[in-house]
Amino acid sequence: MRYMVMLSMRSDVGPPPPDLVAAMDVAMGEAFASGLMIDAGGLMDDQQTTFTLRAGALARTDGPYAEAKEVVGGYAVLDVRSHEEAVEGARRMMQVHLDHWPGWEGSADVRRIAGPEEGPPTR
Amino acid sequence: MTSPEDAVVAVWQLESPRIVSGLLRITRDLQLAEDLAQDALVAALEAWPRDGVPANPGAWLMTVAKRRAIDTFRRAERHRAEVNRLGHEMTEESVGELVDQVDHVEDDVLRLMFLTCHPALTAESRAALTLRLVGGLTVEEIARGFQVKDTAVGQRISRAKKTLAESGASLEMPIGAERASRLDDVMAVVYLVFNEGYAATSGDSWMRTDLCLEALRLARMLAALAPSDAEVHGLQALLELQASRFHARTSSSGEPVLLEDQDRARWDHLLIRRGLAALARAESSGQPVGVYTVQAAIAACHARARRAADTDWVRIASLYDLLSSVGDNPAVEVNRAVAHGRAFGPSAGLAVLDAVESSSYAWHAVRGDLLARAGRGSEAADSFRLAASLTRNEAERVLLLRRAATSESGGA
């Protein structure tokens, strides 16, 4: 089973402290080494665009956005044996933030990725 | 909804190789190491549903297990030296330091893999013991994967541990030529586990996919533990690339779909990317390539072709030539004949095929295909019929007889 973990935080959170970056390197290195994590990335806010479809009208807004809001700041794809294993993978990422980024607030969403026989085609 | 126990077991499985291998270093007794790890699991099952998962579950489990180890040694009133050493370590080492010993831990896990794949054991025992102690799987999960009884797996594992103890198998890290040969043994076990799932033609395919995933994880782990050995990256690449085709291998009605007929959009492109990256690591090492790397390179030729018609058969043929030069494997020769047939025409394929003696159904089936492509219809029909009489797979038999009939009537 494959899961995606999305890490959300306020868009005005600022750059992560070096301590967090180092600790995340270690944690993610371990997760990749154990075969649990198979992909991960941080999402930048210097180049972003949002399309909004409302009331039959398509609108485009280009960032960066002045107003602070909750955004996805990073993601990880996990190859797991159980839902709980994915949950633990996400908990570890949050624990690193708790331990190494004082004052940081955010959330981690743990979602199963649809298998090839369910959900929309991946092509 | 999952139970709190499921959560504990999931965490324990993640930590299990480090816990068991760390305990093995301390106790130098595989059975005792496993018992202590189980004790730690039991303690976690009691504490975590009540108190929540600790911030650092690995350190928590290790601390509990070490404490039990000391108790065990004290009760036995022997191993005086170990008690002293452990008592010393427990006061000196903070939990944080325990976790920071990453290099140490990696060596421990690799040593454990060398032990569970020890040459004193049978192939089945190596696989079961590795999945149990390195993969952290339960006996029931292993039995399901191999489609045998729980008791058979349980016996296999306890016999294997006994064999290791009796043979005085060394816990030390092998070096030099021995390391190379033992690493080959470990890779063979991972490959065997993968193939057990991949080649499955019967049973619940869902469970078998799990076995492939487990082998893939072991391969990824091994590549991280022994990164300076090129071939481990080749093995990882091969398994990632083969696994990328998993879902395209069967039709919606459950029939097997041959590589050339697969819907390539259904290939798993994340795994292809990972496979190609692992292959690049193997190929850039400057070390001589091994059989897994060459097979991965062949799989990569298929992975890179957006359409079956784009396949670089000339390169595949040369890679099979390379494989053929290092071993004596009739299956390789049959595949080499296919590749030469595609790359240089049917008569080139037949030349390769006719140079090997084989009475396998695959040999006759490929011969039939090459003869049909060469326009030798009635000879092709004979080969297809011979192949049909040799296969045990009903669907295949029907297909081969159909091709025999088409060839006879002049079609390809």
Image (cartoon, grey):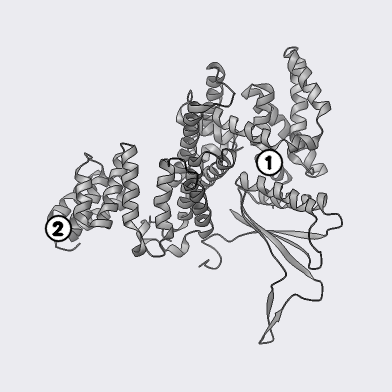
Residue for badge 2: B377
Q: Secondary structure at mark 2?
A: helix
Q: Earlier in the sequence, mark 1 or mark 2?
A: 1
Check the residue under mark 1 and report the chain it is in: B
Q: Secondary structure at mark 1?
A: helix
Q: Are marks 1 and 2 in contact (CB under 8 Å)?
A: no
Q: Nearer the viewer, residue B100 or B10?
A: B100
Q: Nearer the viewer, residue B184 or B74?
A: B184
Q: Residue at x 57, y 21 (%)?
A: B170
Discs 1 and 2 lie in a common subunit: yes
Inspect this view and state whether residue B250 appears.
no
Residue B40: name its quadrant.
top right
Q: Residue at x 71, y 42 (%)?
A: B8
Residue for badge 1: B9
Label 1 to label 2, Cα distance in Å? 60 Å
B88 displayed left or right of B409: right
Mark 1 or mark 2, which is nearer to you? Answer: 2
Badge number at residue B228: none
Q: Residues within 10 Å of mark 1 (few under 14, many from 20)?
A: many
Q: Amino acid at mark 2?
A: Gly
B305 versus B297 height, above or below = below
User: How far from the left and from the top, in percent, is residue B292?
Assistant: 43, 43
User: How far from the left and from the top, in percent, is residue B396?
Assistant: 30, 52
Check the residue under mark 2 and report the chain it is in: B
Residue B321: name its quadrant.
top left
B266 displayed left or right of B338: right
User: How far from the left and from the top, in percent, is residue B69?
Assistant: 74, 23
